[in-house]
Image (cartoon, rainbow, N blue to C red):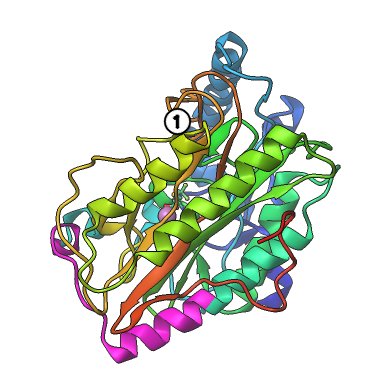
Amino acid sequence: MDSAIGSYICQTIDCSKPATLQCPTCIKMSLAPAYFCDQECFKRYWPIHKTYHKKQEEQDDQKNKFKFTGPLRPGKISARLFVPDHIKKPEWYLSGQPTEEMKSKLQQVVDCKTPEDIQKMRECAAIGRGALDAGHAAVKAGVTTDEIDKIVHKYIIDHDAYPSPLNYNGFKKSLCTSVNEVICHGIPDDRPLENGDIVNLDVSVYFKGFHIDLNETYFVGEVSESSKFLVEKAYTCLQKAIEICKPGTMYRDVGNVIEKYITENGLAVNRTYCGHGVGQLFHCAPTIPHYGKNKAPGFMKVGHTFTIEPMINQGTHQDILWTFDNWTAVTADGQRSAQFEHSILITEGGCEVLTARLPTSPPLDFKI
Ligand code: MF3
Ligand code: CO
């Protein structure tokens, strides 16, 4: 099995074998490559696969017509990576659909984790932290976000865990990489990072039945003073939010703390994407807005686990979607955005940052 690590998954919808055979038409049309495990699968899947050629061309057409808000352009996205058989998969691995997650009562009620749950989440978080640190160590000018995705993917499967984003609502990669004006959900592609870029790596891991979620924003080489300011404030506002996490704190107050600090510094808080419960489900209750005067219900109790992940913009708080990929959220004015995220457990004494940085973590680019 090990020889298959680092290879792609067969594109046939109901096959999860490692695949090395490339569709020759894709090559000829120089489309993002698709792989198949054998001729049999290729033949069987052809009626569906050939529509992929057309879809790719249509997508290219949409990209060419798209009114971009900033300088960043999408690159080519590689095929989906293979995950070894022995790894426990979430429901969306083959279907792409988080059906149970959407139906679950955990979308309405916030559960309190048991000591056993918490132990599993700590193990899961250790893998997530290690994966993010491995990705961070690879960040430099000239490296593509696709290469970083492969490093993070390998780290996670080498630790017998599953990269939660992979095929979640059809997301094609194991990691989200959000460069410059991308707010969140950027898809790793073949664009090399450039000196002066900022890049957010958002890692999520599924292990022993639990998810964990964390992200950080890094400098690529030498960045402008305004980018340094943005990233440092995005980091600090998360720390300020964590300081109020303890039993009894209202979830709505997280946004008040963040908004106050961020607007005092002349920056803006994104209002579209929120923190969320995390655990047996990747995304569940509570929903935690990062902006002020929000109406989020409920308060923190011992055993709650959730993320805080404020997205901070230089200019307008508003975002738009790259409609040709339906994932990438960018700032409406093309200015930059930065983010940090932790998964947090509420304890008797306050909280535990499950995804905290380690002494071995590569240092951030600014004083903390
Ligand atoms: N990790 C993101 C979050 O912080 C979610 C990514 S969903 C994906 O909630 F499909 F894009 F991976
Ligand atoms: Co999250």
Main SS, magenta region, reads helix
| Mark 1 within 8 Å of ligand 1, using the beta carbon | no
Q: Is residue 189 visible?
A: no
Kindly identify the residue that appears in the image at 23 percent across and 41 percent down. 294
Q: Is 132 included in the stretch rendered in magenta?
A: no
Rendered position, 1 above or below 95: below
The quadrant of the rendering that contains the N terminus is bottom right
The quadrant of the rendering that contains the C terminus is bottom right
Q: So how many labels did they put on this image?
A: 1
Kindly identify the residue that appears in the image at 69 percent across and 36 percent down. 227
Residue 104 % position (x, y): 17, 61
Name the residue that disc number 1 marks: 326
Q: Quadrant of ligand 2?
A: bottom left
Residue 15 placement, left or right of 1: left
Kindly state the secondary structure of the residue where label 1 is placed: loop
Residue 6 placement, left or right of 304: right
Kindly identify the residue that appears in the image at 32 percent across and 56 percent down. 276
Rendered position, 367 above or below 53: below
Q: Name which residue type carries label 1.
A: Asn
Kindly identify the residue that appears in the image at 68 percent across and 32 percent down. 26
Residue 330 % position (x, y): 52, 28
Q: Residue furthest front?
A: 264
Residue 182 placement, left or right of 191: left
Q: Quadrant of residue 137?
A: bottom right
What stretch of residues is rendered in magenta? Answer: 105-125
Please name whichever residue, 335 or 134, is drawn nearer the observer in this view of the structure.
335
Rendered position, 58 above or below 343: above
Q: Residues within 10 Å of mark 1 (few under 14, many from 20)?
A: few
Residue 202 % position (x, y): 55, 54
Q: Is residue 25 visible?
A: yes
Residue 27 % position (x, y): 74, 33
